[in-house]
Amino acid sequence: MPFIEHGRGRAYYRHWAATEPRAAVIFLHGFGEHTALYHRYGFALNAAGIDLWAVDQFGHGLTPGTRGDFGSVDESSALAESLTELAEAAHPGLPLVAQGHSFGSVVTLFRLLGQPDRYRVGVVSGAPLTPIPELNSDSAFELDPGWLSSDPFYLDALENDPLAFVDADGAPLARELDKAWDRFGTELPRLAVPTLALHGSADPIAPVAGVRSYADQVEALQLKEFPDARHDLINESVHREVAGTVVNFIDAAL
């Protein structure tokens, strides 16, 4: 796999390339995941003429670091910046889409707020925009795989993939999310980039009510809720519908 050089080490990334791309998605995954879990999504985007660039964040996949420790929001944002530069070099002038899932969605939203002219579209899924009761700085953060998805293919991948996990020290993640929650109340209403928030109505980790509340207040934030779907929405049983919704949103924005 190719990699991005960073002060914390090499961050490995994947690029799913469309034959004749008309847009490029810069993607950041969530806790316990890595880029290889997104092959289906990459192929779905490629079929619609959209490139996908995704990086194994620190502490995940092949990228070094303490398991589950993304580092800071700024460090994750730096990885997304490097991916963006790679996408720009590959196809200068191609419209860019910033996308993130779970913790990756938090980083993505701050990037959209900080660089409103860099990306044409934003997409977030399973966004924890309000505090997660199960997550605190004093204990391990452990997920029940059944909270994540009802798709047997994905659950099998989580169980048998040595690079995927559902538990780790919760302190680093809690630290960064606490900072983010303190900022969202004042900063998120300034969001100007058209952004699609995808969320499962049965998400037990990041309840949809928090996203629904922000979507009611922020004109640029559009919520698409999927009935009975859980947290890892892109890898849920409705993954085809989710991918189609993203493609349609990008089409409309472009």
Image (cartoon, rainbow, N blue to C red):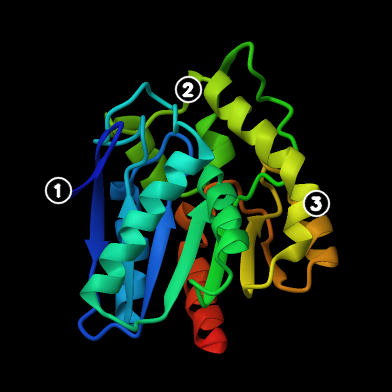
Q: What percent of the width, then of the height, locates residue 113?
A: 63, 61
Distance of label 1 from label 2 (alpha carbons): 25 Å
- Disc 3 marks a residue whose amino acid type is Thr
Q: Residue at x 59, y 32 (%)?
A: 176
- Disc 2 marks a residue whose amino acid type is Asp
| Crowd rating for badge 2 (residues with CA inside 10 Å; few <14, some 14–19, many 20+) | some
Return the residue at label 2: 167
Tell me if I can see residue 209 in this picture: no
Q: Residue at x 44, y 43 (%)?
A: 76
Q: Are marks 3 and 1 in contact (CB under 8 Å)?
A: no
Left or right for 124, reference 210: left
Provide the secondary structure element on which disc 1 rests.
loop
Left or right for 213, reference 234: right
Return the residue at label 1: 1
Distance of label 3 from label 1 (alpha carbons): 39 Å
Mark 3 or 1, nearer chain start: 1
Q: Are marks 3 and 2 in contact (CB under 8 Å)?
A: no
Q: What percent of the width, then of the height, locates residue 80?
A: 40, 54
Q: Nearer the viewer, residue 219 or 209?
A: 219
Provide the secondary structure element on which disc 3 rests.
helix
Return the residue at label 3: 186
